[in-house]
C-alpha cells in the first residue's frame, strides 16, 4: 500500500509516493478522492528489451535505478563509489512541504531533498549533499540536479538565447528524443541565458496551452533542460530540471562538509505563459529583498555624459532631472581615480580628486536637496590590469595564468579570497556612509573564463558566486535602506538568485524602444515589471542608431521601473514638458503597474504586440498596443484584450497623455471616439478592432470597471 504525500496550493498539486520514493504528479490541482486512482495507475507495463519489472522514475533518479538520462546525483571518492545507491531514511511533510532524506551507506553520503509549494503554486526544490565517511578520500561532487517528470502530452520546448543589447530572445521547437540541454559556462547567466525553460502542449502561447517551467536561481554556471528517452520516465513522457554546473574539482567534501544546491523554481501553468508568469511574479514579490516602497523614477547619467565628469554639467543635469519629476539621480562610471575611460582604474574605489575636488558628498547633498535619492555606479567584481589594486595585489586576480585575456580591458577579482572581499566591503561601506548613497548600480561587464583562484588553485565559479551573495547580504545588513541593481553589461545576470538580494535588474544596455519592447516582453515571463529597469533614451539610440519618437520611447519605458538615460539639459522646452507629463503618468499608474497581473496577447501578426497589467482585484487595467514594423495586412482585425474579469463590465478607452500617436490609416475605428463598454468576457473572447499604427508607435489603452 502506497503512502502518499499531497502538497497542494495555488491550484497546483504535487503528489509523492513515499513508499517507492517517487513523484506521481506535478501539475493541476487534484481532488483528494482521486489520489488512490493516481497511485494505482502510476505503474506502467514491462516492455521488451528492458528490465524485468516496470520502469519507474524516482525522486532522485540515478543510473542504479535504471534511468539512462542525466542523473540527479553524480560523485566519486578517488574514482570509487561512482554509482550512487540511494535509500530513503526519513520523511518530514506538511501541507505544502516535504523533506526527503536519503543515504548511500557504502559511499558515505547523506542527501536531503527539500520541496516547498508556495501560496502561488510555485514549487521550489533544493538538494543538500553531505559526506559522512571519516578518514576517506574527499567526495568529489560532479552533479546535483533537480529532475521532475512531466506528461507525454508536453511536446514542445521553449527557452531563450540572445546577445549584448538583444537579450532574452525566445527559441522553441518540438521536443525530440534526447536532451535539450542548456549549459551556462560563463560564470554568470550571460546574454544568451536559457532564463526560463518551458515544456508544454503543442503551440502553447501566452494565453493558451498547458506547460511546465524551470528556472535555476543561480548567478554562476548552471544547466537546465528537458530530456526525453524512447522508454519515457516511468509513466511520464520526459524530465525537466537542472542545477548548478559544477567544474572538475570544484566541490570536494570532507567528512561532515555539506554542499547546498541552488534553488530550482518550478512553475506549472494551465492557461499559457501568462498563467506561469502570474505564479512566478507572486513568488518574486514575496522575497524578503523585494522593495516595499514605490519605485522611484530614475535618471542615470551614462548616456548623458559617459566618462566626462564635469561637476557643473552634472549638477545642471540633476537640476533638470528634478524639474521634470525624477526621483533618483544615479552617477554612472567615471567618478573614481584613474578612470578617464574603460581601460584603467577598476578596483581603485577612491573618488577622483581631479574630477571631484570636493568629493561626491556635495553632489549627493545637492541631489538630496532637490528631493531625489542619490545613486552611484560600481563594478566591484572586476579589476583593470592598469590599476593600483592589480599592481599591489596580483594574487587577487581570478585567473588560470597571468597572461589570461582581458575583456573590456578588465579581469576578475577573486571574491573567494577573504582579503579581497573584505577590501571591497570596506570601500563600498565607507562610500555609502560618507557620501550618502541610497542606491548602487552594481555592474559586471565580462564573462568568467578559466576562473581559477590563485589562493586555492581550484576552479572557483561556485566560490565566486557564493562570495558575491555574501557581499551583497553583508552590505544590505549594514545598510538596510540601501537598494542595489544587478546590471551585467546589460541583462547578462537576471536570475532569481541575485533577485533575492537586489531590488532591480537592468534588462539590457539597449534603450532602443523597438528592441526593448521584445526584451521586456520576455524578461517579464519571470520578473515582475517593478524590478525591470527601463529608460527613455535619446532620439537616436546609441546601440542601434535607430530614431524613435519621444511618445514611443516614453510608452515603452512606462512598463517597468522607469527612468531616463539622456542629456535632458539639451532638450527643447516642449520635450521637457512631455517628460513632465510622462513622469506624472508614471506616478499615477505605478501602483497598478507594479502590483498587478501582467498579461500579453498572442500577436495578431509578427510586427504587433499587445501587453498590459490588470489590477489584482480586476478593477482597472492599462495596455499598450504596439506596432514595431510594417505588416503585410493593411488593417487590424478584432483584437482580444486579455485578463479582465469575465463577469464584470468595463469601459475601454484610449489615453493619449503622452502626445498624439502616429497612425498609418485615414481614420480610427469608430469606437475610439467615445470608448466602448462590454464585459471582460467579451473583450477576452471577441475583442475590438484597433487602429493601424505607424511603425514605431504605441498607444495606451485603459479599462476601468463600471
Image (cartoon, rainbow, N blue to C red):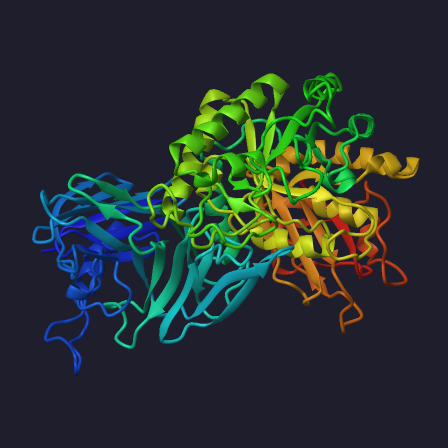
In the picture as drawn, the residue positioned furthest to the bottom comes out as 48
Q: Nearer the viewer, residue 75 or 622?
A: 75
In the image, 370 versus 632, the foreground residue is 370
Residue 469 is situated, as x and y percent measured from the top left of the image, at 43, 36
Marker count (numbered):
0
Relative to 420, does residue 275 appear above or below in the rendering? below
Left or right of 368? Residue 29 is: left
Q: Quadrant of residue 651?
A: top right
Q: Is residue 552 above or below residue 96?
A: below
Name which residue lies at 76% across and 74% down.
Answer: 632
Quadrant location, the C terminus: top right
Tell me the residue at 64%/28% (across/down): 375
Residue 409 placement, left or right of 670:
left
Question: Position of 706 compared to 502: left or right?
Answer: right
Front residue of 507/279: it is 507
| Res. 618 in view | no
Residue 214 on image: x %, y %: 41, 55
Q: Quadrant of residue 703?
A: top right
Amino acid at each position: 500500500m502506497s503512502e502518499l504525500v499531497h502538497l497542494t496550493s495555488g491550484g497546483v498539486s504535487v503528489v509523492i509516493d513515499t513508499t517507492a520514493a517517487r513523484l506521481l504528479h506535478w501539475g493541476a490541482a487534484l481532488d483528494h478522492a482521486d489520489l488512490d486512482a493516481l497511485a494505482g495507475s502510476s505503474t506502467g507495463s514491462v516492455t521488451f528489451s528492458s528490465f524485468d519489472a516496470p520502469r519507474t522514475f524516482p525522486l532522485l533518479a540515478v543510473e542504479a535505478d535504471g534511468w539512462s538520462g542525466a542523473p540527479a546525483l553524480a560523485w566519486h571518492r578517488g574514482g570509487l563509489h561512482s554509482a550512487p545507491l540511494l535509500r530513503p531514511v526519513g520523511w518530514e511533510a506538511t501541507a505544502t512541504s516535504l523533506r526527503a532524506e536519503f543515504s548511500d551507506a557504502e559511499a558515505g553520503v547523506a542527501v536531503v531533498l527539500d520541496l516547498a509549494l508556495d501560496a502561488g503554486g510555485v514549487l521550489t526544490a533544493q538538494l543538500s549533499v553531505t559526506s559522512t565517511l571519516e578518514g576517506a578520500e574527499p567526495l568529489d561532487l560532479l552533479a546535483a540536479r533537480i529532475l521532475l517528470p512531466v506528461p507525454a502530452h508536453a511536446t514542445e520546448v521553449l527557452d531563450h538565447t540572445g546577445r549584448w543589447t538583444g537579450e532574452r530572445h525566445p527559441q522553441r521547437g518540438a521536443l525530440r528524443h534526447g536532451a535539450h540541454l542548456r549549459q551556462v559556462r560563463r560564470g554568470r547567466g550571460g546574454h544568451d541565458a536559457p532564463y526560463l525553460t518551458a515544456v508544454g502542449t503543442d503551440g502553447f502561447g501566452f494565453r493558451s496551452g498547458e506547460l511546465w517551467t524551470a528556472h535555476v536561481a543561480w548567478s554562476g554556471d548552471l544547466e537546465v533542460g528537458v530530456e526525453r528517452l524512447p522508454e519515457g520516465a516511468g509513466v511520464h513522457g520526459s524530465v525537466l530540471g537542472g542545477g548548478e554546473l559544477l567544474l572538475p574539482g570544484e566541490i570536494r567534501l570532507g567528512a561532515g562538509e555539506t554542499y547546498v544546491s541552488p534553488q530550482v523554481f518550478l512553475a506549472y501553468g494551465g492557461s499559457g505563459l501568462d498563467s506561469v508568469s502570474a505564479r512566478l511574479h507572486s513568488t518574486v514579490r514575496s522575497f524578503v529583498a523585494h522593495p516595499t516602497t514605490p519605485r522611484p523614477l530614475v535618471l542615470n547619467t551614462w548616456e548623458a555624459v559617459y566618462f566626462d565628469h564635469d561637476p557643473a554639467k552634472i549638477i545642471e543635469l540633476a537640476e533638470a532631472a528634478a524639474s521634470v519629476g525624477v526621483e533618483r539621480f544615479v552617477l554612472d562610471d567615471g567618478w573614481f581615480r584613474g578612470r578617464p575611460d574603460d581601460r584603467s582604474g577598476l578596483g581603485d574605489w577612491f573618488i577622483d580628486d581631479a574630477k571631484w575636488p570636493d568629493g561626491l558628498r556635495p553632489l549627493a547633498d545637492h541631489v538630496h536637496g532637490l528631493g531625489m535619492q542619490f545613486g552611484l555606479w560600481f563594478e566591484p567584481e572586476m579589476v583593470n590590469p592598469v590599476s593600483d589594486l592589480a599592481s599591489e595585489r596580483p594574487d587577487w586576480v581570478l585567473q588560470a595564468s597571468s597572461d589570461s585575456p582581458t575583456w573590456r580591458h578588465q579581469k576578475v577579482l577573486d571574491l573567494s579570497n577573504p582579503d579581497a572581499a573584505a577590501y571591497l566591503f570596506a570601500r563600498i561601506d565607507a562610500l555609502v556612509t560618507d557620501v550618502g548613497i541610497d542606491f548602487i548600480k552594481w555592474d559586471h561587464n565580462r564573462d568568467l573564463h578559466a576562473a581559477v583562484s590563485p589562493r586555492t588553485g581550484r576552479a572557483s565559479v561556485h566560490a565566486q558566486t557564493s562570495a558575491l551573495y555574501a557581499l551583497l547580504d553583508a552590505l544590505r545588513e549594514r545598510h538596510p535602506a540601501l537598494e542595489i541593481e544587478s546590471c551585467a553589461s546589460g541583462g547578462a545576470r537576471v536570475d532569481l538568485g541575485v533577485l533575492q538580494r537586489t531590488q532591480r535588474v537592468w534588462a539590457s544596455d539597449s534603450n532602443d524602444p523597438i528592441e526593448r519592447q521584445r526584451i521586456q516582453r520576455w524578461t517579464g515571463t519571470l520578473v515582475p515589471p517593478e524590478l525591470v529597469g527601463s529608460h527613455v533614451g535619446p532620439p537616436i539610440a546609441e546601440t542601434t542608431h535607430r530614431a524613435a519618437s519621444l511618445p514611443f520611447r516614453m510608452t515603452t519605458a512606462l512598463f517597468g521601473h522607469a527612468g531616463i538615460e539622456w542629456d535632458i539639459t539639451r532638450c527643447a522646452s516642449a520635450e521637457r514638458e512631455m517628460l513632465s507629463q510622462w513622469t506624472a503618468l508614471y506616478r499615477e499608474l505605478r501602483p497598478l503597474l507594479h502590483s498587478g497581473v501582467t498579461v500579453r496577447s498572442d500577436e495578431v501578426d509578427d510586427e504587433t504586440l499587445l501587453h498590459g497589467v490588470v489590477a489584482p482585484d480586476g478593477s482597472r487595467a492599462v495596455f499598450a498596443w504596439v506596432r514595431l514594423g510594417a505588416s503585410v495586412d493593411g488593417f487590424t482585425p478584432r483584437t482580444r484584450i486579455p485578463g479582465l474579469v469575465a463577469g464584470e463590465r468595463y469601459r475601454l478607452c484610449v489615453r493619449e497623455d503622452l502626445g498624439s500617436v502616429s497612425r498609418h490609416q485615414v481614420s480610427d475605428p469608430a469606437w475610439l471616439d467615445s470608448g466602448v463598454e462590454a464585459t471582460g468576457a467579451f473583450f477576452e473572447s471577441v475583442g475590438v478592432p484597433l487602429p493601424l499604427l505607424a511603425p514605431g508607435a504605441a498607444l495606451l489603452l485603459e479599462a476601468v470597471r463600471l
